[in-house]
Structure formats: structure tokens, C-alpha cells
Amino acid sequence: MYEFLIFDADHTLFDFDRAEKNAIIRVLYETGQPYNDILLELYKNVNTALWKKFEKNEITQIKIKTERFRLFFEKAGITGDFQKASVNYLEYLSQGSYLLSGSEELIFTLKKSYIIGLLTNGISTVQHPRLENSVFKNVFDAVVVSGDVGVNKPDPRIFQLLADKAGFFDKKRMLMIGDSLTSDMQGGINYNIDTCWYNPNRKHNSTEVVPTYEISKLNELYSILEQGRI
């Protein structure tokens, strides 16, 4: 049976899309650029590409902070101070502690029976305030933010750091739950623990990453845990 459940934060428990959209709206307003969904998608594409590079250790978090807005402004034809926009965006993003539907009930229910960990690839000044201002403050038994430790998923070392914090080392009784195949699932595989891919949009898996389980709703995790696996 599983005893230590490791959760990703954004797109798994936290509604990052909502926080991101609100932050972008405020940044664009300050540049005098009216918001529209096309601009949001453009920013997302730029940002996602950079974070994929981060997973491969091809770019640092510090570089991402400004580079994404430099590229975004350039592609969108926006004139303005992209460095100031980067600083303000992070501040606005850190205020977005929105949760995905069902995540609060899930975590508080599981907390009664399991050790719960949070493992996120994120910027420290963004992730910590979002967690502290949410109902999940002081709920997780161990939390590791990549920005604090200089290593990120899918590197197995960040999983070990979380295990060290939790004081739990039996990999057969650990389960990683997250939405990213290349970060969460590949990271769990690299650390040699079971994985559960949260895939609410039922995306086709075109990668070579093979999760142990796949769910499209958070409450489907209960049946997996009831079955357990050793």
C-alpha cells in the first residue's frame, strides 16, 4: 500500500491558468495594451517553451523571468519595459492562490491517512506566497520548490530532497501525482517510484513516458489508493 503521496502543484492542485491570466491582464493594462485571448496564448507558448528548456537544464529560472517577456513583447509587437513587466508579473502571480475543483477535498481527506508532499518546479517568490495564502498552508508534511534547491523535476535528486524532508524512504510505498509527463511522470520514473498522470483533458500521450496510472478526475485517485501496489 502507498503511504507517501507526492503531488505536483500547478495544474494538479492549483489553478495556475486562472492565476496566470489575471497576472497577464494586469501587466498588459500597465503597458496600455488591451488584453485578448490571442495575446494570452502567445505568452503561454513562449513561457511553456522556456520551461521545457528548464526541465532539460538548458536555461535557468533567473533567465526565464525576463526572457519570456522579452520574447513575448517582441512577438506581440508590444512596446514597453519588459524587465519591469517581468517583476510586476511575478508579484501578481504570487497572489493567485486559486485551487482546482476537488483538490481541497482530496488533500484534506488524504491527509488523514497518508504522508503528503508537494513538489513543484517553480520560482520561490511565487510559489511560497501562493501556498501560504491558500487553505493548504501547513497541510503538507514536506514541501520542496525547485527555486529553493537549484534542482528541478525530472531530476531524481529533487525527489530525494523531498523524501529527506518527509523522513520517508521506502520507494515502493511512494506515488507521484501530477499533470506533466515530462516533468512529474518522468521524474517519478527517474526516481524509481510509481506515478499517476492527472490528465483532465484526456490528451494523447505521444511521448515514451509510461505512467503507472492515469486519471482524468482527481477523485479517481481514491480507487487507485484502495487497490494499492507493492
Image: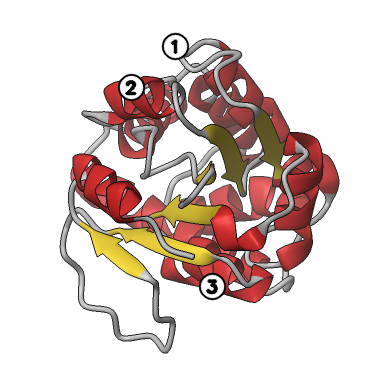
Q: Is residue 17 left or right of residue 168?
A: left
List the residue tagged with mark 1.
135
Q: Nearer the viewer, residue 36 or 225?
A: 225
Identify residue type, mark 1: Val
Residue 45, x across and y down, in percent: 39, 62
Q: Nearer the viewer, residue 168 or 24?
A: 168
Q: Are marks 1 and 2 in contact (CB under 8 Å)?
A: yes
Helix, strand or loop status at disc 1: loop
Identify residue type, mark 3: Gln
Badge 3 density bin: few <14, some 14–19, many ≥20, Cα 10 Å: many
Residue 86, x across and y down, in percent: 61, 36
Q: Nearer the viewer, residue 51 or 212?
A: 212
Circle number at residue 75: none
Q: Nearer the viewer, residue 225 or 133?
A: 225
List the residue tagged with mark 2.
104
| Residue ID at (44%, 11%) | 135
Q: Are marks 3 and 1 in contact (CB under 8 Å)?
A: no
Question: Tag 2 or tag 1, which sits nearer the N-term?
Answer: 2
Circle number at residue 186: 3
Q: Rounded to the nearest whole Å, what is the CA distance between mark 3 and mark 1?
A: 29 Å
| Residue ID at (54%, 30%) | 89
Q: Are marks 2 and 3 in contact (CB under 8 Å)?
A: no
